[in-house]
């Protein structure tokens, strides 16, 4: 989307929203919101009779609303705050009105993007940065087909006697850390919660697929189906995270997608599966073999070359870096391989027509717009420069000696993100500067007066 173009919602979106309003005459409230840089929804509740105002761009919010820090505060010295009078932008719908069925009163939601007051793109809205990278990939002649896998903890309301979160389990005895991966009894014990999650997904047209019990008690993973519109995939991922938290509240529970909620239990990741289609809809990673095409290897090489420049996006909080531990299924070395879950970029086995790359770096605490933008920028970089990766790794990548490792500190990741020429090319430079200002402010606050416990209580919002 060119910066000078004015956004208008599609007729399909407006028609679906009108049909929804006609089918729900007893609707009480509508939540209008956009996602900020940390992936937190920012918006307003309005009476249901304000629906047409929302659909027509009648909801205004400060342009700075999408660049608040984790505590919901303005960035000091931000160009969007006092320097420009803290002026308003307008929120325009980017998804149809849908029901938010976890509320007691009939409440709908309208997912929006924040634009400049004249309807042109606002660089600070993170959704715009993904749109920018997607357009660049499409100029190369490709569409990205993506899917996300989100891990999370389902928690009891309230902390234990030590102030620690309490994962749900199928009994009330003291929780003993254990590996419960694929344990159906864990799913059975929460069947009413997951039934409501499934119903809410259907109400919001979110393509939830399989549900599994993950590596720790109370930890689960739900996969979303693939789609050849990365912006829509990111929309669905963030809306799904919001849905999980809403349904959990209605059950007297909580959901956390913090990267490392418990020091001695598994972290939460968000793996991204990716392939590319040409203009005829063919998977250009598929040549009928198990190895895939040269374009697949170029894409892998591009993601490897840009991974450390992107770590501030893949691991956006200090807590994020606790997830990267040996033999944890979170990657440490920059490497790739076939059907190998110890590597950073995995080529899953299976039918060649589904040949794809699994990107395994990001935690579940991320903003999906920025993660997909960073991944696709890496793909573009690999294709445009015809990069080639090293040899694929076989066996345990944690045991390999490599000088190429992922950055393992928040400060180091921010330094490299700020200095990277890549992001000044693929993102709006003003966004890069704003992102760094935001994260430096969070760092300074933690260093000055906020304890880890206080900080991580806020991180549970992401």
Image (cartoon, grey):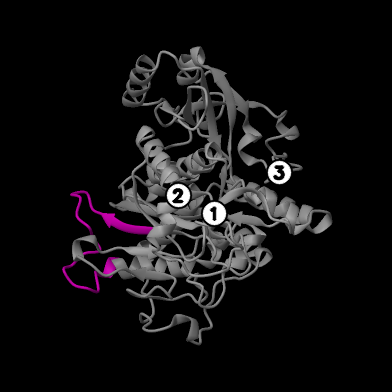
| Disc 1 target residue | 168
Q: Is residue 28 visible?
A: yes
| Quadrant where the image shows the N terminus | top left
Residue 448 point in image, percent of width and height: 83, 56
Q: Quadrant of residue 24?
A: top left
| Disc 3 target residue | 71
Task: Specify start and end residues of the magenta stretch as a single range.
Answer: 272-295
Verify whether residue 290 appears in magenta: yes
Q: Secondary structure at mark 2?
A: loop
Tell me what residue is drawn at x 41 percent, y 13 percent.
25
| Disc 2 target residue | 190
Q: Residues within 10 Å of mark 2 (few under 14, many from 20)?
A: some
State how far apart marks 3 and 2 are (Cα): 31 Å
Tell me what residue is drawn at x 44 percent, y 14 percent.
26
Q: Secondary structure at mark 3?
A: loop
442 and 301: which is toward the camera: 442
**Disc with the residue nearer the chain's start (3 vs 2):** 3
Q: Residues within 10 Å of mark 1 (few under 14, many from 20)?
A: many
Q: Residues within 10 Å of mark 3 (few under 14, many from 20)?
A: few
In contact (CB < 8 Å): disc 1 and disc 2: yes
249 and 231: which is toward the camera: 249
> Does residue 74 sit above or below 256 in this rendering?
above
Verify whether residue 110 appears in magenta: no
**Disc with the residue nearer the chain's start (1 vs 3):** 3
Q: Quadrant of residue 378?
A: bottom left
The disc at residue 72 is none
Q: Which is closer to the viewer, label 3 or label 2?
A: 2
**Total numbered circles:** 3
**Disc with the residue nearer the chain's start (1 vs 2):** 1
* Main SS class of the magenta portion in the image: loop
């Amino acid at each position: 989307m060119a910066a000078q173009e004015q956004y208008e919602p599609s007729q399909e979106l407006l028609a679906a929203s009108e049909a929804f309003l006609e089918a729900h005459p007893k609707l009480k409230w509508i939540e209008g919101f956009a996602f900020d840089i940390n992936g937190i929804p920012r918006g307003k509740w309005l009476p249901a009779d304000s629906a047409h105002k929302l659909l027509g761009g009648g909801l205004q919010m400060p342009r700075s609303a999408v660049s608040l820090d984790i505590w919901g505060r303005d960035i000091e010295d931000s160009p969007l705050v006092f320097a420009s009078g803290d002026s308003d932008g307008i929120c325009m719908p980017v998804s149809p009105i849908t029901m938010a069925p976890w509320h007691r009163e009939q409440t709908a939601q309208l997912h929006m993007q924040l634009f400049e007051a004249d309807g042109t793109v606002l660089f600070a809205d993170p959704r715009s940065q993904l749109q920018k990278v997607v357009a660049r990939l499409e100029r190369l002649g490709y569409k990205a087909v993506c899917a996300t896998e989100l891990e999370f903890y389902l928690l009891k309301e309230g902390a234990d006697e030590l102030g620690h979160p309490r994962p749900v389990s199928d009994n009330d005895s003291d929780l003993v850390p254990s590996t419960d991966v694929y344990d159906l009894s864990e799913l059975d014990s929460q069947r009413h919660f997951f039934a409501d999650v499934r119903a809410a997904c259907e109400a919001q047209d979110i393509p939830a697929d399989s549900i599994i019990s993950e590596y720790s008690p109370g930890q689960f993973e739900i996969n979303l189906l693939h789609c050849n519109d990365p912006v829509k995939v990111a929309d669905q991922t963030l809306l799904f995270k919001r849905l999980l938290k809403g349904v959990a509240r209605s059950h007297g529970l909580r959901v956390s997608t913090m990267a490392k909620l418990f020091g001695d239990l598994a972290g939460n990741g968000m793996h991204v599966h990716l392939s590319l289609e040409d203009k005829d809809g063919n998977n250009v990673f598929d040549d009928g073999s198990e190895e895939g095409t040269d374009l697949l290897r170029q894409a892998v090489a591009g993601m490897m070359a840009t991974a450390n420049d992107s770590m501030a996006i893949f691991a956006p909080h200090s807590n994020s870096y606790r997830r990267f531990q040996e033999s944890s299924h979170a990657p440490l070395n920059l490497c790739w391989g076939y059907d190998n879950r110890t590597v950073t970029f995995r080529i899953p086995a299976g039918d060649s027509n589904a040949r794809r790359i699994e990107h395994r770096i990001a935690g579940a605490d991320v903003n999906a717009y920025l993660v997909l933008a960073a991944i696709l920028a890496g793909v573009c970089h690999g294709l445009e420069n015809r990069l080639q990766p090293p040899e694929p790794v076989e066996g345990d990548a944690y045991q390999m000696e490599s000088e190429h490792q992922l950055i393992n500190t928040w400060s180091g990741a921010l330094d490299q993100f700020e200095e990277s020429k890549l992001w000044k090319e693929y993102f709006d430079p003003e966004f890069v500067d704003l992102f760094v200002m935001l994260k430096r402010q969070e760092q300074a606050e933690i260093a000055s007066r906020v304890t880890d416990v206080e900080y991580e209580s806020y991180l549970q919002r992401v």
